[in-house]
Image (tube, coloured by chain):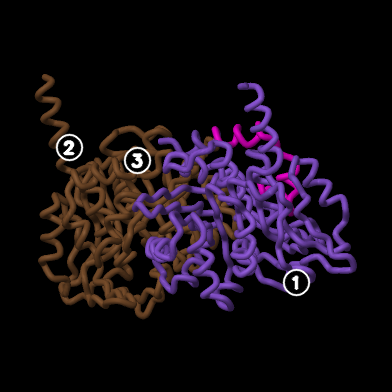
Chain colours: A brown, B purple
């Protein structure tokens, strides 16, 4: 009986424990030191590569037939279920062209080509419906709300959002947040969304719309977790001597956070604090090389080793 | 014999264990919420009030006869030795008028009136000469270099510097750093000084000029300690629901850091990490009210309580 139960569990795990919905994109990333054109990127790519270190992960995205097949194979090679990636024949994959300034802290958008992402009607393969953990990346909040209906009863739904939707679809953003358990968002976008400078007040406003926790990401300065029970957990970022490409740090954080929660099967404050540290750890790997190169290269052991290093680093 | 030794030690302590050299100023501080005109401020005021919580502190500064006597009495009431405050009859006290933006993170200088600070030739009372710990605030680096000659053999000298001196007296700044044990500096000023975006590289460059450690302050994002043995300690700032006036946070940090080192009598990495946390704690008090109001109000117990709160806050 026990064996059978384990067997069934592992089947479920294989089917889908954590689902990520977001973009699989081609990025052109320009830093003062190097430019890489049309490399694999996108929120769902970073988040799923990150969470796949921790738990069985599935991905939902739409791409054009211009996306090199090797990119999807790279995700599959990491154990990610890619049945939810819809390919539109003759369509163009989302393309994001941006430049970083000298200290890699400010990004300028040069070009955003939505391609097949515009008007995508997200559906999920049946085997994703039992996912217990769902990460809705910075998609159109209407799409995020829609896709939620396809899941049976996830234990934790977490979303992100960005300036584009805050400015254009504020009501939908608030509605979406009300349907999630948690929000993970950049500091500047939290301020824009909440029309409030103080991050603690931003978090309270976000939670007043219905989410149970809010994580405000501060880039190289780490992240702060707030819960609707009034608990707060500020964390420093893992310290790196050199950052190569900040792209994807936030989504890698989200994947690491939710991945650890899924692996642990618990979402109490202690588990969430650990998850924040795993989020920082995954973000720190993401920025060590262009695009997803580093996330593709690391193993679970690398992640655990860096988690231990982080613990030593911040201990006093 | 033992009693006599303790007696002598306490006399020495009373004379001066830690000396702070910097401005005692009148600040006009404007936030979007309130303006306070000509209140007590200045780097040496914040740093000495902060370090006085930890250890016997003396102050060196020059003021005009327009400085209300109650301000010096307020420092004395906290046990600070003010014999090193030189009053120039008919002279004007340094006056700094600045405005903070909406999120209190950017400050604009409206007016800087140097008054008696310009051309001050710093000397110290004889009883300061045996100070074991010296903090040279953001003064003219030439003045900082000069005053150092008056101390017998301090165990630790720490300095700060600002954009004005980096732009105008870069060589003196580098020379001054070479004569100190440690530098405490804002992130943006470190970048300006070192012509380098990466903070780790900035710290290495600063230490290449001769200091043994560098602390880079990141405002609400905490601080990072680097040592010339390659050790790094990033720390989050203490989390506050509300910030009233960010003025003086950096100097309060410096006072708390050096004060704890002086109290502990040790400067190994473990002691320096604790000192960084005490620095964060003192910075967090400073910003809770306008000017030095909060630093004047707190006790040693308040500081220890917040240190414990900090430990709980960042623990995972």
**Viewer-side residue, B182 vs A54:** B182
Q: Chain of mark 1?
A: B
**Viewer-side residue, B91 vs A68:** B91
Q: Determine which quarter of the picture holds residue B143.
A: bottom right
Same chain for the residues at labels 2 and 1, yes or no? no
3 or 2: mark nearer the eye: 3
Q: Mark 3 falls on what kind of element?
A: helix
Q: Mark 1 falls on what kind of element?
A: loop
Q: CA distance from mark 3 to mark 1?
A: 46 Å
- Rendered location of residue B13, percent (x, y): 66, 37
Magenta span: chief secondary structure: helix
Q: Determine which quarter of the picture holds residue B89.
A: bottom right
Q: Determine which residue is flagged by label 2.
A: A12
- Rendered location of residue B310, percent (x, y): 53, 38
What residue do we see at 61% from left, 58% from top? B136
Residue A245 lies in the magenta stretch: no
In this rendering, would B271 be left or right of A313?
right
Where A146 falls versus B195 (above or below)?
above
Magenta part of the chain: B285-308
**As drawn, which residue projects farthest toward the top?**
A1
Where B221 falls versus B191 (above or below)?
above
Q: CA distance from mark 2 to mark 1?
A: 72 Å
Residue B290 lies in the magenta stretch: yes
**As drawn, which residue projects farthest toward the front?**
B1
Number of residue marks: 3
- Rendered location of residue A270, percent (x, y): 40, 33
Q: Which mark is residue A311?
A: 3
Q: Mark 2 falls on what kind of element?
A: helix
């Amino acid at each position: 009986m026990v064996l059978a139960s384990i067997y069934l569990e592992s089947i479920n795990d294989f089917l889908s424990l954590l689902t990520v919905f977001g973009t699989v994109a081609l990025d052109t990333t320009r830093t003062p030191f190097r430019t890489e054109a049309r490399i694999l990127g996108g929120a769902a790519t970073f988040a799923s590569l990150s969470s796949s270190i921790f738990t069985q992960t599935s991905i939902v995205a739409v791409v054009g037939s211009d996306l090199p097949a090797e990119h999807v194979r790279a995700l599959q090679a990491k154990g990610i279920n890619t049945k939810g990636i819809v390919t539109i024949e003759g369509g163009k994959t989302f393309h994001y062209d941006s430049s970083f300034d000298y200290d890699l802290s400010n990004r300028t958008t040069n070009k955003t080509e939505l391609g097949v992402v515009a008007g995508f009607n997200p559906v999920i393969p049946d085997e994703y419906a039992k996912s217990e953990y769902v990460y809705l990346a910075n998609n159109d909040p209407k799409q995020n709300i829609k896709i939620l209906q396809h899941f049976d009863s996830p234990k934790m739904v977490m979303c992100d959002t960005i300036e584009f939707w805050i400015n254009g679809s504020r009501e939908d953003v608030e509605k979406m947040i009300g349907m999630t358990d948690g929000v993970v968002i950049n500091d500047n976008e939290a301020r824009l969304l909440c029309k409030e400078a103080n991050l603690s007040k931003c978090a309270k406003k976000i939670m007043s719309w219905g989410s149970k926790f809010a994580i405000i990401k501060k880039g190289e300065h780490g992240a702060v977790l707030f819960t609707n029970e009034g608990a707060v957990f500020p964390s420093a970022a893992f310290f790196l001597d050199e950052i190569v490409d900040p792209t994807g740090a936030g989504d890698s954080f989200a994947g690491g956070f939710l991945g650890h929660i899924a692996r642990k099967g618990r979402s109490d404050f202690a588990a969430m604090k650990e998850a924040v540290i795993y989020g920082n750890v995954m973000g720190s790997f993401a920025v060590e090389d262009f695009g997803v190169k580093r996330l593709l290269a690391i193993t679970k052991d690398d992640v655990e080793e860096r988690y231990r290093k982080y613990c030593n680093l911040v201990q006093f």
